[in-house]
Amino acid sequence: LLISVNTIKRGKAPGPFADSQEVLKWWALTKQDNHSYPNIIKLSQLIQIIMTDTFPTELQNLFSSNILICLHKSETDPTKLRPIGLGLILRRFISSHIARFYVDAFKSYLNPYQYGIGTRNGMEFIINSCTTSTQTYITRNPDDMQNNPPTRVLISLDLTNMFNACNRRHLLHIVRQRFPELYPYFNLSYDNPNLIHFQKGLEGKWSRLLQQDGCTQGDPLGVFFAAAIFHDILSPLDSQLRQRAHHRKHILKDKYDDNQGGLSDLTTWVDDLCAAIPYPDLKYTIQYLQI
């Protein structure tokens, strides 16, 4: 916990109630004369209350609430705005703390498809793999192309609005099954609709809406949220594609083979999919993903 507190950076935006990360860090690192950190113990006790489903009901809506601000996406068009969500500082800190110390467990669960969590330079790995695979065909001479035509199609997808569209009930089911000790915290954050506060109109009058699905913006665990949901889409797809490849090779005795047994390669970086799909499985994959 002391490590996580020491990594709090300055200049971060405050929470919806003007709560500050710098104040949290200053309070947690206050020393006594014997050089101990008594407030670290208090912070640990507070986190234990939150993580064991004993957080007061009256405070749960406040803990999971959010505030939206807007950043301009265009220097010439003031109507193009990007909403940025700011959650409670304590919630953001706890989520960051969980993400830091559960990264290996998350990585183990999301393998072998996900390279966006716990994999250093994961995006570069996917890009380099796709580039290498593509160049093996581009750089061949005409005779090689005639005798050994391409056998795969590269599918590259950037899923739109995935963080807001993920199903919360499914996420809570995943956490309950795979990470039961984290379930009270995820349940506190996402079981009920989140209160989202924002300023409306030119007058800046405060209003609010209820977010009933997806993860709230500004939640450090939102990346795991999206990756876990995507994993549960890709895992059964991978199983189906392997069965189809096995059926072609061993039942139909199909001569089709690309030195990989006709197996598909599904790799993702959070919500970006880069898949090398054999021709016989292309239509099936597109229909499965409902592209």
Image: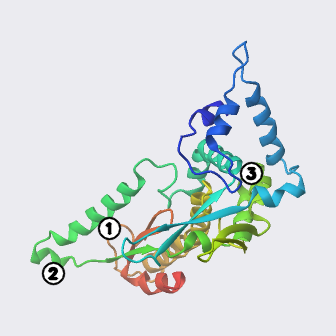
Give the quadrant of residue 282: bottom left
What residue type is disc 2 on?
Answer: Gln
The 10 Å Cα crowd at callout 2, few under 14, some 14 to 19, many 20 or more, is few
Q: Indicate whether 280 appears above or below 89.
A: below
Return the residue nearer the eye: 136 or 201.
201
Q: Is tag 1's residue or tag 3's residue first in the polypeptide sequence?
A: 3
Image quarter where the N terminus lies is top right
**In the displayed structure, would residue 142 be above or below residue 47?**
below
CA–CA distance between discs 3 and 2? 55 Å
**Disc ID at residue 146:** 2
Within-10-Å neighbours for mark 1: few <14, some 14–19, many 20+: few
How far across and down, in percent of the image, does residue 136 sit?
A: 22, 66
Number of marks:
3
Q: Earlier in the sequence, mark 3 or mark 2?
A: 2
Q: Position of residue 32 (x, y in %)?
A: 73, 18
- In the image, which is nearer the foreground, mark 1 or mark 3? 3
* Residue at x 39%, y 50% (from the top left corner): 121
As shown in the figure, which amino acid type bears the numbered disc 3? Leu
At x 65% / y 30%, what residue is drawn? 2
Q: Is residue 215 left or right of residue 276?
A: right
Sooner in the amino-acid sequence: mark 1 or mark 2: 2
In space, the residues marked 1 and 3 are separated at their CA atoms by 43 Å
Callout 3–callout 2 Cβ contact below 8 Å: no
Task: Give the amino acid at mark 1.
Answer: Asn
Quickly name the residue at label 1: 259
- Disc 3 designates what residue? 182
Q: Secondary structure at mark 1?
A: loop
